[in-house]
Amino acid sequence: MSETRYKTLRDVPAEEYLLPGSPECAGCGAQLVLRIFLKALGGDAVLVNAAGCLTLLNVYPYTPLKLNWMYTAFASAPAGAQGIRDALDILIEKGKITPKEDLKVVTFTGDGAAYDIGLHAASGAIARGLDFYYLVYDNEAYSNTGFQTSGATPFATSTKTSQPTTLNPIGHEGVKKDLFEIWRSHKPPYIATIAPSHIVDMLRKIERALKYRGPKLFIAFSPCPPGWGSDTSETVRISKLAVETGVWPLKEAIYGEVRHTFIPKVLKPVEEYLKTQERYKHLFHPRRQEKVIKTIQENINQYWQKVREKEKLE
Amino acid sequence: MLKIRFHGRGGQGVKTSSRILGRAAFLDGYIAQDSPIYGAERRGAPVVAFTRISREPILERGYIFDPDIVIVVDETLLDDERARPLDGVKSGGIVFVNTQSEQAQVENVDDKLFIKYSITDAALRVIGKPIVSSPSAAAAAKITGIISKESIIQATIDELSELGLAEEALERNLRLVSEVFDTIPTPQLKILNGETTPREVIQLEYKGVIYEDIVNVGNASLRRVGNWRIFKPIVDYQKCTGCMLCFVYCPDSVISLDAKNKPIIDYENCKGCLICVKECPLHAITAVREVKIYA
């Protein structure tokens, strides 16, 4: 692997760009991800946000951010990023700002905007080769409005709009969209999945992305205590379990070439992960839904089987 | 008509409290109405909920400006300029404050009656979690003096089952409701001719620098969200080795490091998520029950 300034947690930059006092919930996984993300990116960035939980960071007249921030409509954060990028380019061309004063344009949205409502805008921006960063904090539902099913909601999750019932004890019957693969089909310079438990991995990925011009995309696992029904203190633990059980693969794709940055030697049983959250409680109470749990486990096994076979070939 | 106003923070469940109380009144043969108000913010932000109880049809709608009874579920709201829970309470009205007090204490302050009791501690004892929605409804029901214990229990069952609460959790909620109902006294409401405390209109001082305040980066720390906490993380500096894990995993940037990489916690803005307590490999950080006393 190439040179990195991030070897251990001691290398986490001390400078904060997200200061205390935000209105986000205690133990917010998304906010933890954004905090670390901005540390790695540095202070020369401008943020573009679409409707979602983290929109609430800025409630008039307060902001916890040290950076400039623009709010767009739900579907158009990548379009907003295009506008800012163009404006910066024009300012540089006209000599109004020096290339040194240039800013990184960072879009951050939740999974609702990324997987569903703004998918087309992101697709357009990636296809145009827009030079921007896109951070998705994926809490696997519309958490901001009370936890309704989104395109990112995994199979058998209980959400406000997929409550388990006697007729359908499974909960959400659909599957989680594979946004990584949707984006990868555009062959952008950099895509990665990140998790707030694996901080060094996250920092290194952002460091690698800094070298590329064009779309640099990140999907972040973001535990949501009120939506997932987990204790606020469990956020990092759940993230760790998601990676160790294989639910959340840590990987990157450079110009479409996939590489896993962490391959668990032995997968922990997915049950360990599911049991940490109320949104999967119906799989165990009042009676155990063996078939559903098995399906979830088999899907994970199959995914990693393919990964291992591919690694062996290389 | 009896007007009850609940003040809490997002996540504490005052909306549910007002619903349970409304349903209980309905079960006792009254006409009841309940509604919540909340803004764009989430957990921790001030939330208000209302219940109106009457023998006659209720024609009034919206915010209750002149409550007979106010239930303050989170005592830190008493200092919150945005919440102002005591505004408009009728002369002779009753204010319930959830504060560190093991016995229910009753005292007269000015022309109002204050009842103090820690439903949070009762909840921690009975449920094991600081669930304050159902016990707040029980306290309010008892204070009204017109709602039976059977009805408040039945209303709790109905409302919490609707929310999909598991049987065991419901069972514990009922035990708590029953306990709180028995503990809280029923003082006599002495509303004097419906007279209310005049509402204070806040004049925002215009200093001509509001714009500057907005572009002041990171001014959110002025919000002091530390009063959301129920448990407080305390560092044992003897045990701490300065591994930095707590600093890294704090979602709210409230942990900074000293020269020896040991954590300094900004308690004004620590929300008490306790990730640091869970992640500390040496168990050098412990969670201690936050004590705030409304005197």
Image (cartoon, coloured by chain):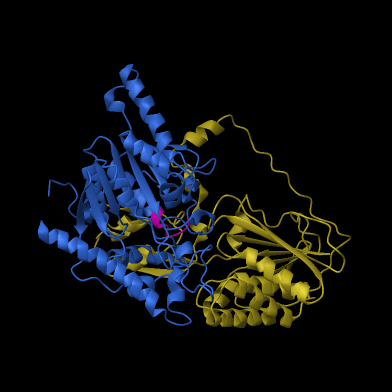
Residue B233 vs residue A70, the one in the foreground: A70
Number of marks: 0
Q: Is residue B192 left or right of residue A135?
A: right
Which residue is outermost to the top? A94
The residue drawn where x is 77% and y is 72% is B26
Q: Which residues are magenta?
A: A25-30
For chain A, give the colour. Answer: blue
Image quarter where the C terminus of chain A lies is bottom left
Q: Is residue A44 visible in this depiction of the protein? A: no
Residue in the picture at 87% in, 62% down:
B192
x, y percent for residue A182: 33, 48
Q: Is residue B153 visible?
A: yes
Residue B63 placement (x, y as % from top left): 73, 54
From the viewer's side, name the closer residue of A67 and B212: A67
Identify the residue at image location x=49%, y=55%: A142
In the orientation shown, which residue stands out farthest toward the right? B193
The reply, left or right, for residue A248 in relation to residue B228 is left
Report the side of B199 relative to A79 (left or right).
Answer: right
Is A284 rendered above or below residue A186? below
Main SS of the magenta part reads loop
Q: Quadrant of residue B54?
A: bottom right
Residue A82's x, y, as percent? 38, 32
* Quadrant in which residue B179 is drawn: bottom right
| Residue A5 image offset from top left, x and y in percent | 17, 46
Chain painted in yellow in the figure: B
Q: Is residue B275 magenta?
A: no
